[in-house]
Image (tube, coloured by chain):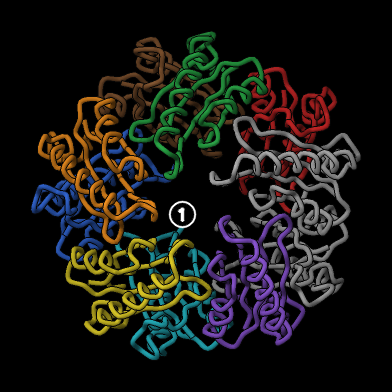
Chain colours: B red, D purple, E cyan, F yellow, G blue, H orange, I brown, J green
Amino acid sequence: MLFHVRMDVNLPASMPEAEATALKATEKAQSQALQASGQWRHLWRIAGQYSNISLFDVSSIDELHQLLSQLPLFPYMKIQVMPLCRHPSSIREDDR
Amino acid sequence: MLFHVRMDVNLPASMPEAEATALKATEKAQSQALQASGQWRHLWRIAGQYSNISLFDVSSIDELHQLLSQLPLFPYMKIQVMPLCRHPSSIREDDR
Amino acid sequence: MLFHVRMDVNLPASMPEAEATALKATEKAQSQALQASGQWRHLWRIAGQYSNISLFDVSSIDELHQLLSQLPLFPYMKIQVMPLCRHPSSIREDDR
Amino acid sequence: MLFHVRMDVNLPASMPEAEATALKATEKAQSQALQASGQWRHLWRIAGQYSNISLFDVSSIDELHQLLSQLPLFPYMKIQVMPLCRHPSSIREDDR
Amino acid sequence: MLFHVRMDVNLPASMPEAEATALKATEKAQSQALQASGQWRHLWRIAGQYSNISLFDVSSIDELHQLLSQLPLFPYMKIQVMPLCRHPSSIREDDR
Amino acid sequence: MLFHVRMDVNLPASMPEAEATALKATEKAQSQALQASGQWRHLWRIAGQYSNISLFDVSSIDELHQLLSQLPLFPYMKIQVMPLCRHPSSIREDDR
Amino acid sequence: MLFHVRMDVNLPASMPEAEATALKATEKAQSQALQASGQWRHLWRIAGQYSNISLFDVSSIDELHQLLSQLPLFPYMKIQVMPLCRHPSSIREDDR
Amino acid sequence: MLFHVRMDVNLPASMPEAEATALKATEKAQSQALQASGQWRHLWRIAGQYSNISLFDVSSIDELHQLLSQLPLFPYMKIQVMPLCRHPSSIREDDR
Amino acid sequence: MLFHVRMDVNLPASMPEAEATALKATEKAQSQALQASGQWRHLWRIAGQYSNISLFDVSSIDELHQLLSQLPLFPYMKIQVMPLCRHPSSIREDDR
Amino acid sequence: MLFHVRMDVNLPASMPEAEATALKATEKAQSQALQASGQWRHLWRIAGQYSNISLFDVSSIDELHQLLSQLPLFPYMKIQVMPLCRHPSSIREDDR
């Protein structure tokens, strides 16, 4: 089950640099584990922005929310979720 | 070179059904040819909307515009384009 | 799996009254069948608007899109979908 | 009398963690009491967001405002209220 | 129970003048009957716009929706509804 | 001369509670004096929000601005003003 | 009493050219009469748009609405009104 | 050459009162000098807001930007600029 | 004097194809004459849209408005104008 | 390959002046080096705003993102990117 997710990161200017660096390192590790498991299917940077476009492949909405809300940067991100489905013109049975 | 494209289709209510059917058939054929060539990399339907999320993989901006502006539904679509690049946390060298 | 759906209906002024009446009757029948099957879990009118708030209970995103896109009024509606999940403060295991 | 309520929570980054934890615990208790009394009829989390969709069942607008404005998180929430009524296509006399 | 209602009227340019005149006359009569009954408590024109600000005093949300949706201009209006309640600084027990 | 005014209050999280309490008390006193004089004709709370809808009855735009800009909460409010006039369908000569 | 008015004109594509020409001529004559009387104090074109910025100097809100709603192009304009008053830093007692 | 400028002032709550008072005094002096020179042609307060509508009469865009960006409140203002020109219905050759 | 102009073209679906073709040919000729004279300094297509970004180099706002409002597609375009000036970090005295 | 970029700078009020001055000096040096290399093709100030319009000429989206994200002011800017291509009415083969 595919969800299109856009994340816009906005760290407060007052956050100490060491804290920001640590947060980003944990975020990266967690993101890469989810990519390796196949749940975080695609991850792209939007050019010129501290934002990403991601595709999640999960078996329920609850699973999606667990993944997103446990990200270290969750409190500092604006997140938008759109459910996707097969397009009738797609040439792939299971485009992921 | 990857571009994220969202297309929202809006056919005028006054278009004869035969014309709409023909337009959609040509659109589908053209879309599938571009998918087969690898230029239209992904194509998903947004649930509940006459809209899609697409990933295009092209070698120039001009190529992207040629592909999009020659689609039969182009005059009836609102199209938004965002350039994408590699995300530093991606586990893939070339995520497409 | 729950989805929150808002539908705003906008029939073109040029539609003959008989056609509108027929469309609405089919829409009503189809909606009531989906309510009876449990897929269209809740259906409310927003006061003062030709709009509704609905809760759908389906087993996949594809099922949701099939239900919505086959509604007779689909071409005349603006539809917004939000995936919902269990709230940690809910007193119900399975609030529907 | 049903009201559709969306709450978006935004705690200031400067709030001490202990204060935030205490606030959330009181909020949860108060929310669960209102759910038990039947006034807070439904409570769902919007996937990927620190936001909820709720249905309130109250006997007056004043009662609704009292409930909402006394929530511990009230000063930190953006709240949107929409009055709902019976939809003519609903199969239930009293859909709640 | 008070509701704040804003109505923006937008008649299609294609409507014959006689039809528009008849619609407005019926609308006016119906509006004045509701004002006389006390349900349509206030009615003001917004300067420079074909729009009004109204206060409705009704005993239920269903009653409000019945009144609004039976107005002859309902299909041609954008309507926004906000529930109002007593302000703690008001000097009147029952400001209407 | 009637003006429709919406005020949305937003006190900074950093304001000491004693200062906030004092500000609100002065605001209430000043608001009640203006209500008593007939200049602040109506004052309602919007349900679920720290906002009000007000009607001012003043003899000039300058008078309106003086009243609003001298409110203690003025620096913390977003204010929107709309001039109102008699509606041709109103049954009252002087609806206030 | 000064009001700042922005008008955006949007004539329907279906309007016969002769009708449009006649409307604009009447509009111009009426506008110039109001300028001559001093009620339509300033009139500027916004560069690149079929829009104007105007200053009206009237003795009441009702007078302003009468002037605007009787303009021949009124049904085809989006109009926004803002009440203005003396700025404390203005060097003129009566800036018009 | 006329430019329509809207300025919305937003001083940070953390600014010491003495600093704010000094800033505003310098702003006022600078504004009045520019009014006296004829460059800042009109200056009005928008009722109910810490905002103004201004008309600038300058000989180049660079001159306009110099004037605006050297204002003491520039860092705390949202500024919107619109170029204006003669309206074909204006009765004045040179409306300023 | 430089102005940044964005034009979004929207031809009505009801326009006969011959009329559209003729309009576009005249538009192209007129645009190329203005480019040759140096007044229409740059002209780019926005990828995926029937829109352009243009830079105009004119000696007055009136000249700019004359150029834009005499374009054959003017009635069918949404146009946004922003005045530009020299950037203090530019390495060119006269970047055009 | 051309990209249209708009940057809106927003330095936090709490940043010490020395830090701001240093940041801007580094930004200026880096911007001028990129202009000299031909990658930052045009740079204009938007009149009345702490914002610029820029044209970048790069060989890939990754190159564009590297340039933008390494700017010293990147954390304090809102950046919008639009891919541009040749306009069919342009008189230049390679308008830059």
* Residue E10 horizontal/vertical position (percent): 44, 59
Q: Is residue B96 visible?
A: no
Q: How many marks?
A: 1
**Horizontal placement of F58 versus B1: left or right?**
left
The secondary structure type at the circle numbered 1 is: loop
* Residue B12 horizontal/vertical position (percent): 61, 45
Q: Which residue shows up at 40% across the image and 75% down it?
A: F21
Q: Which residue shows up at 22% across the image and 41% down it?
A: H55
User: Which sits in the foreground, I38 or E96?
Assistant: E96
User: Which sits in the foreground, E18 or G51?
Assistant: G51
* Residue G89 horizontal/vertical position (percent): 17, 49
- Which residue bears the numbered disc 1? E14
**Horizontal placement of F4 versus I8: left or right?**
left
Q: Which residue shows up at 25% across the image and 24% down it?
A: I60
Q: Quadrant of the C terminus of chain F?
A: bottom left
Q: Is residue G33 above or below residue G49?
A: below
Q: Quadrant of residue I79?
A: top left
**Horizontal placement of J23 versus D31: left or right?**
left
* Residue F93 horizontal/vertical position (percent): 24, 81
Q: Tell me the amino acid under the disc marked 1.
A: Ser
Other-residue count near label 1 (Cα within 10 Å), few / some / many at <14 / 14–19 / ≥20: few
Q: Quadrant of the N terminus of chain F?
A: bottom left
Tell me the chain of label 1: E
Q: Quadrant of residue I84?
A: top left
Q: Is residue I21 above or below residue G73?
A: above
Q: Is residue J83 above or below residue D24?
A: above
Q: Is residue I63 visible?
A: yes
